[in-house]
Amino acid sequence: MSGVARIVVVGSLHYDIIVDAAARPRKGETVTGRSLNRKCGGKGGNQAVAASRAGVATAFVGAVGDDPFGDALVSGLAKAGVDHSDVVAHPDVSSGTSIAIFDDEGDYGAVIVSGSNLLITPGQLRPDLFGTDRILVLQNEIPEAINAQAARSARAHGMTVILNAAPARPFTTDLADFVDVLVVNAIEAEMLGGGTVDGLAQASHAARILCERFPAVVVTAGGDGVAYVDRKGGHHEIAAIPITVRSTHGAGDSFVGTLAAAISRGELMKPALEHANIVAAQLVATPEAERANW
C-alpha cells in the first residue's frame, strides 16, 4: 500500500496458535484436538490488515519480540500491504501470543500472553503519523496510557478516533474524552454500563446509553445484527446476514478494520456499517483452515 497512511492503527500483535476440537475443555478436563494451525493475529494487526485489504493506505504502530513469532508478524503485515515502519522488535522479550480452542459450534475460548505488546512507547507515536482527515484505530490489548496519548495527538490534528474497547476494561485515563466512535460487542457494551444485550433492540438501547459518554456508538450483537447511535440523531439497525457459522474468530476485527476504511473513503455511516457487516459475515462463514492468513 503506497502513499501517506489514511488509517493509523496503534495496537497489538499476537502470533495465534489455533486448536480445533469437538468441544472446549471444562475445568480439570482434557479433550482431544483434531488439528493445530498457526497464523498471525492480534486485534491491532487484524484490524490493520482488514483496512489495508479494503484498499486504504494503513500504518501500524506496535511491538514484537526479537524472535521467530515476531519475524512472522512483521512479514505478515508487509505481505498485507501495511506500513510496519513503526513496529519495534525488543530483544529478550517474547512476542505477543494467543492460544485459542475452537469447538464444533464455531465458538472459541482463548488465552493471550501480551509479551512485547506491553512495551509500546510514546516515542513510537511520531508526529508525522497524525494529520487531518486521517483515522486512528485503537483497541484494549495494549496499555491504556499509550492509547490515551495516541488519541490526544489524533484529536489535536483533527483525526477521527475509533476505539474498539475489546477486551472491556474500566477507563483509568482520559482516553474516553478523545474517542469519536466506540465499537463494542454485546458483552463489552454490558461491561461498560450499557445493560444486557440480547437482540438488536437491546443493542440499540445499549448504544443510546453509551452515547451519553461517546459521540457515536456501534454495538455488534453477533447473529442479531449491528446497532448504531450518535449524538446528531443518527440511528441505524443493520440486520444480521444469514450464514452458516464456521468460526467467529476475528469477526469483530474484520468489522472494525473494514468500517474504518469505509469511513476513510467518505462513506455515510449506514452503508459503511452494511459493508463492514458483510465482510465480517463472510469471514464467519469461512472455516479457519480456508482463510487467507497474513
Image: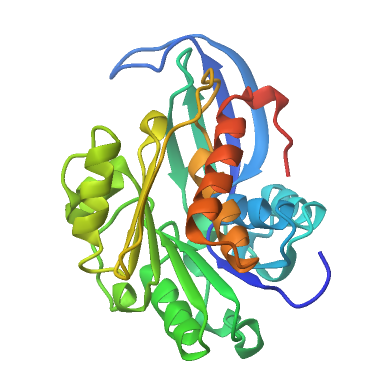
Q: Residue at x 71, y 25 (%)?
A: 290
- In this rendering, does residue 144 appear at all? yes
Q: Is residue 137 above or below residue 124?
A: above
From the top left corner, tell me how far across and down residue 155 is, in percent: 45, 84
From the top left corner, tell me how far across and down residue 57 is, in percent: 73, 67
* Front residue of this view, candidates 157 and 63: 157
Q: Residue at x 75, y 78 (%)?
A: 4
* Front residue of this view, candidates 78 and 232: 232
* Front residue of this view, candidates 251 and 68: 251
- Position of 63 with respect to 169 (left or right) is right
* Front residue of this view, candidates 72 and 181: 181
Q: Residue at x 63, y 69 (%)?
A: 7
- In this rendering, does residue 92 appear at all? no
For the image shown, how many numbered marks are present on the structure? 0
Q: Is residue 102 above or below residue 78?
A: above
The quadrant of the picture occupied by the C terminus is top right
- Position of 144 with respect to 245 (left or right) is left
From the top left corner, tell me how far across and down residue 256 is, in percent: 52, 53
- Position of 217 with respect to 84 (left or right) is left
What's the image's color scheme? rainbow
From the top left corner, tell me how far across and down residue 99 is, in percent: 51, 34
Which quadrant of the figure has residue 44? bottom right
The quadrant of the picture occupied by the N terminus is bottom right
